[in-house]
């Protein structure tokens, strides 16, 4: 995925650099509060349950400090993304049993003929091939710096 295509879904008001939640349900609720899509505010409870159901199927923690909670829903018409960071880390059931520090909450529409949802998810996984990426994202001082780090990593793909 082209860096500019990837980063166009990242919005400054959907960046949460200081997550406080200490467990999975609370963390998902906190991430959902970062969604800024009109009409979705009243539906967050249903989306929260959808995300928890997805987690029961299998954790969306990938290891190396990353989790990508995601779901498809009729409540969104375009890809919606929230990025969150937890300096302390959250026990999220990662396969490497390490705390998760960086979260990409991704909601995609049920109908997605372009497969943008799947392409976005696979791009996140590619970017996080190394632990160095987690360290760089945790050290980012601003949303703009975080986007720059992601664009640089994608340009190297």
Image (cartoon, rainbow, N blue to C red):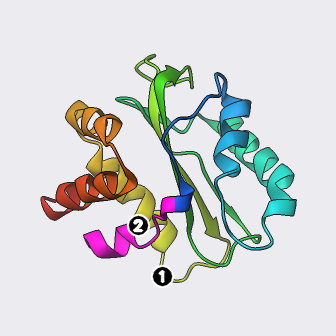
Find out whether residue 3 is within the magenta segment: yes
Question: Is the residue 120 above or below the residue 30 in the image?
Answer: below
Identity of the residue drawn at 65% across and 28% down? 21
Picture coordinates of residue 8, whole percent (x, y): 41, 73
Q: Which residues are magenta?
A: 2-12
Pinpoint residue 138: horizontal percent, then vertical percent. Answer: 34, 35
Q: Is residue 78 above or below residue 85?
A: below
Secondary structure type for disc 1: loop
As drawn, 48 above or below 27: below
Outermost residue, top direction? Answer: 97
The label on residue 119 is: 2
- Which residue occupies the extreme bottom position in the image? 113
Q: Which residue is found at the position 32% from the left and 51% from the top?
A: 146
Return the residue at label 1: 114
Q: Does residue 156 sit above or below 90 in this rendering?
A: below
Please report the residue visible at 48 percent of the width from the left and 82 percent of the height from the top.
Answer: 114
Task: Residue 22: name its quadrant.
Answer: top right
């Amino acid at each position: 995925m082209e860096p500019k295509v990837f980063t166009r879904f990242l919005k400054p008001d959907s960046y949460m650099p200081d997550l406080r939640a200490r467990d999975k349900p609370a963390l998902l609720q906190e991430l959902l509060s970062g969604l800024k899509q009109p009409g979705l505010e009243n539906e967050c409870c249903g989306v929260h349950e959808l995300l928890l159901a997805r987690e029961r199927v299998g954790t969306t923690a990938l290891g190396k400090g990353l989790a990508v909670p995601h779901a498809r829903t009729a409540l969104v018409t375009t890809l919606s993304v929230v990025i969150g960071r937890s300096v302390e880390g959250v026990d999220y059931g990662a396969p490497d049993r390490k705390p998760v520090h960086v979260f990409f909450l991704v909601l995609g529409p049920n109908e997605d003929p372009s497969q943008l949802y799947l392409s976005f998810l696979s791009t996140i996984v590619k970017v996080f091939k190394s632990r160095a990426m987690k360290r760089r994202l945790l050290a980012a001082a601003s949303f703009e710096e975080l986007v720059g780090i992601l664009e640089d990593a994608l340009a190297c793909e």
